[in-house]
Image: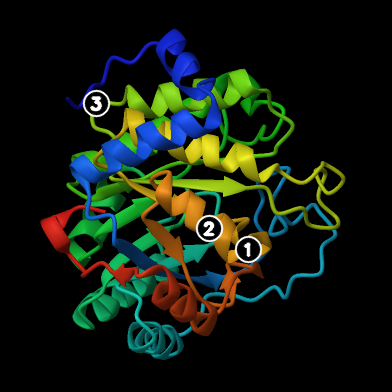
């Protein structure tokens, strides 16, 4: 049964289940709701990089931090479509475009993004954007252009949020999710572990996600990528087992969602990733970059799929993420 009334204590009990039992339970639920051989293959492109006015403590694109990223303005449509076509030929069925904006503004750049959305949609790929905050009218414009999904992560718990970001509120994020949902666009929303949060914070974030009016169709689980020049650069690496616990718990409480093994995958072995798939992950980003940080290549992922007996999920299957 799909529930939207999980309690913190229930999620805590699941999260603290002994690991082998937790993975078994998650794998069993995964089989009830998903084709376990299918993995959604997504590619993420930064269409506007750096210069962001936000202060997200993990992000190398914040203008206030001294990182070594190559700042560039909004790419041209032809460049984006060329990259999308290559991603499609390499096996991706979803193409995600990210812009380092605090919020969408009604200007020529937004019009250009709408045109990009139309172009990628015409390639037969699911189109996703992550552009920061947006209002109801902007969400509807994106929907009308053919946007399939919108990513807007909560990042962490409400309680820990102020330690990571001060330039927008938790409620701002929830409002954007509501605007996206009202426009009929698929919601992609997850978080990051390794931000100095407690296990209770991780549980609280999952509690918020699982009690939304509709579960996010896609839930990315990210491990912090420590980037020199950001305030969190010296935090310890996320334990692999913590990623497994987060994926398994997410699968159990939101069984129909696509659970995306996102940032941090580049530091995992193939056997590590196999356990994540067994625990309920069924979506990945492929391609050499995740916005500005490293990621396994198309070739590496093709080899992994062949060895593990996985196949790419078709675009627009069941019209959900």
Q: Which mark is residue 213?
A: 3
Whether residue 154 is visible, yes or no, is no
Q: Which mark is residue 273?
A: 2
**Cα separation between marks 3 and 1:** 36 Å
Q: Tell which of 184 and 221 is nearer to you.
A: 221
Q: Tell which of 63 and 212 is nearer to you.
A: 212
Q: Secondary structure at mark 3?
A: loop
Q: Quadrant of residue 311?
A: bottom left
Q: Secondary structure at mark 2?
A: helix
Q: Tell which of 293 and 241 is nearer to you.
A: 241
Name which residue lies at 63% across and 47% down.
Answer: 223
Name which residue lies at 38% across and 11% down.
Answer: 7
Q: Are marks 1 and 2 in contact (CB under 8 Å)?
A: yes
In the picture, which quadrant includes the N terminus? top left
The x and y percentages for residue 203 are 52, 22
**What number of labels is visible?**
3
State the colouring used for the structure image: rainbow
Q: Secondary structure at mark 1?
A: loop
**Cα separation between marks 1 and 2:** 6 Å
Q: Earlier in the sequence, mark 2 or mark 3?
A: 3
Q: Residue furthest left?
A: 318
Is the residue marked by circle 1 packed among few (<14), some (14-19), or many (20+) residues within 10 Å? few
The x and y percentages for residue 282 are 36, 55
Name which residue lies at 43% across and 44% down.
Answer: 279
Q: Quadrant of residue 37?
A: bottom left
Q: Can you identify the residue that label 1 sits on? A: 269
**Cα separation between marks 2 and 3:** 31 Å
Name which residue lies at 71% across and 43% down.
Answer: 238
The x and y percentages for residue 304 are 48, 73
């Amino acid at each position: 049964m799909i529930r939207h009334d999980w309690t913190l204590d229930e999620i805590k009990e699941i999260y603290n289940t002994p690991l082998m039992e937790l993975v078994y339970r998650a794998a069993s639920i995964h089989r009830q709701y998903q084709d376990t051989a299918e993995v959604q293959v997504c590619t993420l492109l930064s269409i506007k990089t750096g210069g962001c006015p936000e202060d997200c403590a993990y992000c190398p694109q914040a203008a206030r931090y001294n990182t070594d990223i190559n700042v560039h303005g909004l790419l041209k449509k032809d460049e984006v479509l060329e990259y999308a076509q290559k991603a499609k030929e390499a096996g991706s069925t979803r193409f995600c475009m990210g812009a380092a904006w605090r919020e969408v503004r009604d200007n020529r750049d937004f019009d250009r993004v709408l045109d990009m959305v139309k172009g990628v949609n015409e390639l037969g790929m699911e189109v996703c954007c992550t552009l920061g905050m947006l209002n109801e009218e902007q969400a509807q414009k994106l929907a009308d252009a053919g946007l399939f999904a919108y990513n807007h992560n909560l990042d962490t718990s409400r309680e820990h949020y102020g330690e990571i970001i001060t330039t927008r509120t938790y409620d701002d994020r929830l409002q954007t999710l509501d605007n996206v949902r009202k426009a009929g666009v698929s919601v992609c929303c997850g978080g990051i572990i390794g931000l100095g949060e407690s296990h209770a914070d991780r549980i609280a974030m999952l509690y918020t996600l699982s009690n939304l009016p509709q579960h996010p169709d896609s839930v990315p689980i990210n491990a912090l990528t420590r980037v020199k020049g950001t305030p969190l650069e010296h935090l310890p690496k996320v334990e692999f087992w913590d990623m497994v616990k987060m994926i398994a718990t997410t699968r159990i409480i939101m069984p129909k969602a696509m659970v995306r093994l996102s940032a941090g995958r580049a530091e995992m072995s193939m056997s590590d990733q196999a356990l994540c798939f067994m625990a309920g992950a069924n979506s990945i980003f492929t391609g050499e970059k995740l916005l500005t940080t490293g990621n396994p290549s198309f070739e590496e992922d093709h080899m992994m799929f062949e060895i593990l007996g996985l196949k790419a999920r078709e675009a627009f299957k069941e019209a959900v993420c």
